[in-house]
Amino acid sequence: MLIQLNGVGRRYQMGQGDFWALKDVTLSIPEGQMVTILGPSGSGKSTLLNIVGGIDRADAGTVRVAGIDISHASERDLTQFRRATVGFVFQFFNLIPNLTVHENVEVTADIVKKSLPIAEVLDAVGLTALANRFPSELSGGEQQRVSLARAVVKNPALLLADELTGSLDFATSRDILRLLVQINETYHTTVVLVTHNAAIADMTDRVIRLRSGELEEDRLVGRLIKAEEVTW
Amino acid sequence: MNTLLKRLPRTARSNQWLVYGSITMVLLACMLYVSLNALLVDIGQSRSRFERDSRIESATFLPQRPFTDLAAFESDRGLTIERRREVDAAVPGGLTLRVFEQTEHIDLPVVTAGREVQADDEMLLGQTVATALKVPLGTTMALLGRSFTVVGFASVPDYMYPIRTTDDAGIILDPRAFGIAVVTPAALDTLVQVPLTTWHVRAIDGNTDKARQALAETVGLTYWQDIGSNPRYTLATAKLEGAASVSTSMPLVILLLTSLLLAAAQGRIVRMQRNQLGTLKALGYSTRELVLQELFLPAVIASSGSVLGVLASVLTMRPLLNFMVSYFSIPLYVATVPWKTALIGLVAPIFFVVPAVALVAVRLLGQPPAKLMQTTAISTRPGLLERSLHLTRGSFQNRFAMRAAIRGLTRLGLLMLGAMLAGYLLLFGGAMRDSMDTLVRGAFKDVRFNYTYLLTAPQLENPWGGEAITMAPFTTIDGKLTFQATGLPATSTLLVSRASSGAAIPVDRIIVTRALALKLGLQPGSTLALHQSATGQEVTLTVDAISESYTTAGLIMPQDRLNGLLGTPSASFNAILSATSLAIPARDVLMALSTAESRAAFDSVIAPLYATLGGVAVFAVFIALMALSIVTTLAVEEERITISLLKVLGYQPEELNRMVLSSGIVAVTAGFMLSIPLLLTSVARLFTKTTSSISFSLPIRLSPLSIVVCAVIMLATYLVSLRAARSKVQSVGMAVSLKTARE
């Protein structure tokens, strides 16, 4: 198993009391699987994704990813884990505004030992012609492609995408989802996708549904539709 | 890592005002620090060598009897003694030159340009006069009916601070009105005026007291002045010591405040990038890599500012030294920037800025990436202060401005720091002006005479007119301070001493001036133990009153009592005060002092002083503009999203300016107010230290008018910086808020 969560909980302080965003979540995800995490706002989807990606820490339980216990890892080991294992795609792209498209991808390629060729990745996401543009000169869809290329260039074992179509129009969203499937199939990358759009779930292997921080449903769907068929 | 470095020039380009403003501030602060310190070191080293090369005297004296065998006396007592003659020659254009004969053993003139005199029709001209009046070598000058060719410029060590008189008003140097010249002894013999003769002694073992004792025993002394009591020497050293305090403390304070301001501003910039930093951390960058990355721009700003500052001070070293040389007559042997000073100038900004920014970055990056990416730079949660204020009344815009101010308290603190720095510099100029003004006005207020004649020997009859008085130098028991005691006749009307109430103090009292009282910590009723400078005889006096005179450390007492202390007949006198010029034979006059000339010297000095203070004010305004602009620009950058959102909602630019920028005025006012006590405390310490070994005190004054003027300049500067910030507010696009992730 690439990901193994056991009794994971995450607590936030809200005013005078505590609020558990995740409660006793136990699940595992094998290598190469494409998984959708569904749930309404505040259900703990993003929190779960952040904990799996090592950008947040659990307050309870254990998290093992690619054989590493990241719930108890040192800050140094956690950084190494993110660097070597995980690729992130964010809803609001989070590009470095004063770096070009090529440089935004290069930023990640710089810090890994065996990155994919940047030109190949940019070609795969259709950005070769825009390589020297700055993020402010791109549309939302183009920016998300850059974000995707940045995550993929280090050829991570795990690709985490948080509401990656949340800021995009239908056509662009389908395009991005198609790229995601392509990456999963080409590089055998495990993909965990957070969304509140149930339609997206049908194009993935498995659906995990959260409600109020608890695991409500975990089922295999077997890629019922193609990315191009996703509707809103 | 290399890719991330590409951000730097682009960040610099998109924040030009911030980056170049910061570099300029560091440049100015470094230049000020390095230049002043280097000046001090160079002048100090030059002075030491000058004193050695010119064989500076230990004291000037007048013997009561001629030496029977001077050579034997010198060899017995380990002393070098030399007579020197001088005459004052008026040169057309209001210049008076004190013409000395060339000496061979003591107080040798040191030639700073040209060559020494070789013929009787050649002369050396004082360096200060030559610089001030731009006299070229080879000029022919007529002195007392004879023509001389200027073959060189020179400095004489006992006229290191070349002033005409050493009375209270003569402390001001006016190189256009007074200077020195040196001719051969034979040339002096041919001048139409009878020269005044003074004797100079140099103690080989440096023991001046022993020399005085030996001379008093052998030939008797009518006049004695240690070089350490000679204002023409001590004013130079005191001013250099004062400059030392200014050179080491003020620029360091400015450098420190500038570095703090820069560190704080850069720290804010790091905070503003938290979303980017969170993303990079999520992508796998380590905290160390990101901290190093964030340190690069502040380090570049600090180091380029300091390198340019040190370079600028190297380039301006020579003109600055030449300016100093026009003030102190000291040959320039050294004109370099000491490596230690340059190193401090280079390292200090980096030393302060880099660790401060590193601290901010390390603390910030200690948070998990998820939190970094979620939270905005300024906390959106109301703090304790904001909650406790219950902001429910008043218009929304006012409440918004209040909330923005409370949430941006650190930023307001920064603005206050900038205002303090600028206020300090502005008020420094104001305080110097007011203090000098008080000193100058006080110097002449109760002076009703225009001429003072010091006689060569005590007299019993006064056929010349005026008010006959007695004057004698006294020295404190520790030997640190020498000052004049003046004995006034019971009928005296020309010199009035006034108490702090403004009432005249009767002349039958023992009165000390405020300047002396401050130096020795005296009060009415205090006991004052002294010894006579000429004979060393000890006396003890009880102070009856203190007169409000800051210009002269002096003692005033009934004439008969002073004569009693000196052992001279009770009706004798050795000086005359007069409202009009008196025809006293030159052989009887040791020194003639003119108050009118002193007044003229003051007037001629006040104009350049104002010009200097104007320069300080321009420098202050520039620093203020930089500091305030950096902080107001930061305010707009930090509030970009809110400004953008409010624009979307339909707020006008004027309303936005008021809501986002208006709270700054409180910080600027507070910073300016705080700079007043800071300045008064530091300048008072500086003045006390500077004047501790000389005969006057500088009262620290800061008039309400100066405060108002400085406040207006400060406000105007702030308004200019706000204009720049307003154009930034207008340039914030409405799309910013729509595209940016918020918590």
Image (cartoon, rainbow, N blue to C red):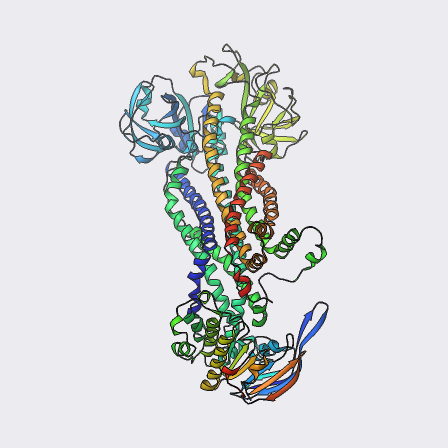
Residue B609 seen in this snapshot: yes
Above or below residue A44? Residue B355 is above
Above or below residue B334? Residue B447 is above
- Camera-side residue: B711 or B556? B711
Horizontal side of residue B41 vs B489, given as left or right: left
Above or below residue B300? Residue A102 is below
The residue positioned 49% from the left and 64% from the top of the image is: B294
Q: Quadrant of the N terminus of chain A?
A: bottom right
- Camera-side residue: B467 or B425? B425
**At which x and y percent is residue A145?**
46, 74
**At which x and y percent is residue A204?**
54, 85
Q: Quadrant of the C terminus of chain A?
A: bottom right
The residue positioned 54% from the left and 52% from the top of the image is: B632
Residue B67 seen in this snapshot: no
Horizontal side of residue B623 vs B188, given as left or right: right
Horizontal side of residue A5 vs B731, given as left or right: right
**At which x and y percent is residue A126?**
41, 76
- Camera-side residue: B617 or B588? B617
- Camera-side residue: B154 or B362? B362
Q: How many marks?
A: 0
